[in-house]
Amino acid sequence: MFWILIWILLALWGCTYVEEGEEEREPLRLTVLDVGQGLAVLLEQGGRFALYDAGPDSAGIADTLEARGIRELDWVALSHNHRDHVGGFVELAGRPLAGGTATAPKVRIRRLYVGPDTAGGVWRDSVLYVAMKQGIPVDTLVRGSVLELGGTANGSVAGGSAVDGESPELRVLWPAEDDVVEGNHGSVVLNVSWGKNSALLTGDLDSLGERELLELSPTLSAGVLQVPHHGSAGSSSLAFLAQVSPEYAVVSVGDGNPYGHPALEVSQKLKFALGDSLRLFRTDLQGSVSFEMSRDFLFKR
């Protein structure tokens, strides 16, 4: 009996042993936060956090993060300059005040990434003003830019670290560097991949942008799709959904919004592309929606 026990212990030790120098990577969690009619996606791994879009300024994104114990973000990446995507950044980083000052930040932001969107007016100006006043470095994202989560203090752009398959890759797929883009069409598209698993964050990309994206990335696919433009009829073309062929799709949308998002025809196309209506999620119905990803698995939490 003694030797049987020793054999069992050795077998268990062999199953859990990690060679010296190896690092066991924690899974990446991706959460489409419920921010009403807007978009904010929280990325977290190993106690490090980042945000793709920040929702509207009226959604309480700072309170949402503080309730999760988050006091610092490695970076915030804003897809384009519409209020329902960037307003929350001003709340997080500190609102501008009369006299050239800004309120104290509620959550420390180490770096701000923006796209080449030339539109946005007052909201674009407010975001850049607050970043300047708070001393937050700003970089512009274009196709080929690579971000890091918890790798370096400020992340990296246009090159990034070597991809060894042992950690997730966050790569910008759109817009192309030589394109003049603005508004929804200029939304920064971020592909979060790890091994065979991936999530595609599309902001408010329109159908023209979808077509141009597929021309640049003809084999593009994703396990999780953040549905473009809150399910607007002007996005989520059937050709795009058929190519991306997601396993899950999430619509970030406000309850009773005046735009009719998501459009009925988009919901029908999504259910067809997914093959199962239970794999389609809406933040107005289910609240915040989370997924976990590693090199070997992808599942909804």
Image: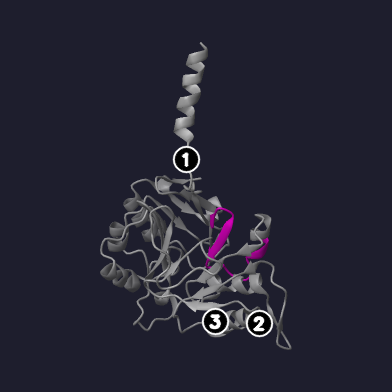
Q: Pinpoint residue 194: horizontal percent, then vertical percent.
A: 40, 54
The Cα atoms of the two marked residues, 3 and 2, are separated by: 14 Å
Q: Which amino acid does label 1 sit on?
A: Val
Q: Which residue carries the number 1 mark?
A: 18
At label 3, the amino acid type is Arg
Q: Residue extending furthest top?
A: 1
Q: Mark 3 points at which residue?
A: 124
In front of the other: label 2 or label 1? 1
- The crowding category of the residue bearing disc 2, from other C-alpha atoms within 10 Å (few below 14, some 14 to 19, many at least 20), is some
The amino acid type of the residue labelled 2 equals: Lys
The residue carrying mark 2 is 133
Q: Distance between the residues labelled 1 and 3?
A: 48 Å
Q: What stretch is highlighted in magenta?
A: 44-63
Residue at disc 1, secondary structure: loop
Dot 2 lies on which element?
A: helix
Q: Which residue lies furthest to the front in this view?
A: 20
Labelled pair 3, 2 in contact (Cβ < 8 Å): no
